[in-house]
Image (cartoon, rainbow, N blue to C red):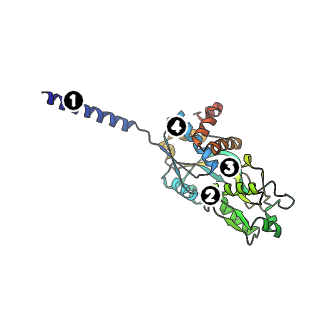
Amino acid sequence: MKNALSVSFVMKTAVAVSAVSIALSANAVEPIKITLANWADTQAVVYTAKYVLETKLQQPVTLTTADLGIQFQGIARGDVDLMLGAWLPVTHAAYYARFKNDMEDLGVIYSGAKIGWAVPDYVPESEVAAIGDLNKPDVKTKMNSTIQGIEPGAGEMVASEKAMKEYDLAGYNLIRASEAGMLTAVSRAYQSKSWIVATVWSPHWLWQKYKMRYLKDPKGVLGGDEQIHGFASKQFAGKFPRANVFIRHFKLTLADVESIELDGNASNDWSAAAKKFVDSHPEKVQAWLQQ
């Protein structure tokens, strides 16, 4: 009898656990897959959106790091749901032209961004004011015939390769590295006050840490002010209608992004930096969450 009761209890418990599991499974919320690069500006935007989605809309999010071309391809194929760091009309123009018909443009997140080449302020402007000045023999020697770049697939690197041809920078070597590699090179140059020219962009926390200036680009090869767009897969709005509305209302300023970047870089905790910004800007959050 005792064994029979035990068996009965175990069976009823198993049935109850199975029912709960099935119910939880049925109610599980599919996560939004956001793809990004390990660039400070993109991390600032993505982690802020992630924090709002998860804490205000109870929408789980998973992040996937990928090179830029893979990000665009993933959105176009529907392998991922969102990317929040597309620079237009110039920097990412080639990727946009290739994939635009297979993506949804969710609008501009912030404006006033730009890419360019920059030098530390201790490099005399009288000697190096514009990209063409890099051709001066003395300048080329002091720059060690190098331009410090970032990842090969980045839109900025594509534009930089074009700039080298347009300004006939024969003999210069465009160094391919990561954003971290570029920042390390700038930091080392500052410590020794050696000359360096690096591919940089705004917004970036580097402008708050180092005194640098953009080199003039009279031919406009590196473009002017850029807008940062959010792109989604064609299936996104149907699968995540509330999140779709939120992203369309998600707007930041250049100063907002640099503020989040500075905190994220200092703490190496992008989630905490995003939380700090969101918690201290309730009026922005209210605007983002309007329906």
Q: Secondary structure at mark 4?
A: helix
Which quadrant of the structure image shows residue 145?
bottom right
| Whether residue 228 is situated above or below residue 29 in the rendered picture | below
Is residue 272 at least partly visible in the picture? yes
User: Where residue 189 sits in the image (x, y, percent)?
Assistant: 74, 57
Q: Residue at x 44, y 39 (%)?
A: 29
C-alpha distance separating marks 1 and 3: 63 Å
The three-letter code of the residue at mark 4 reads: Glu
Q: Secondary structure at mark 3?
A: strand
Q: Earlier in the sequence, mark 1 or mark 3?
A: 1
Front of the two marks 2 and 3 = 2
Identify residue for label 3: 227
Q: Earlier in the sequence, mark 2 or mark 3?
A: 2
The three-letter code of the residue at mark 2 reads: Ser
Identify residue for label 2: 178
Front of the two marks 4 and 3 = 4
Q: Residue at x 59, y 40 (%)?
A: 48
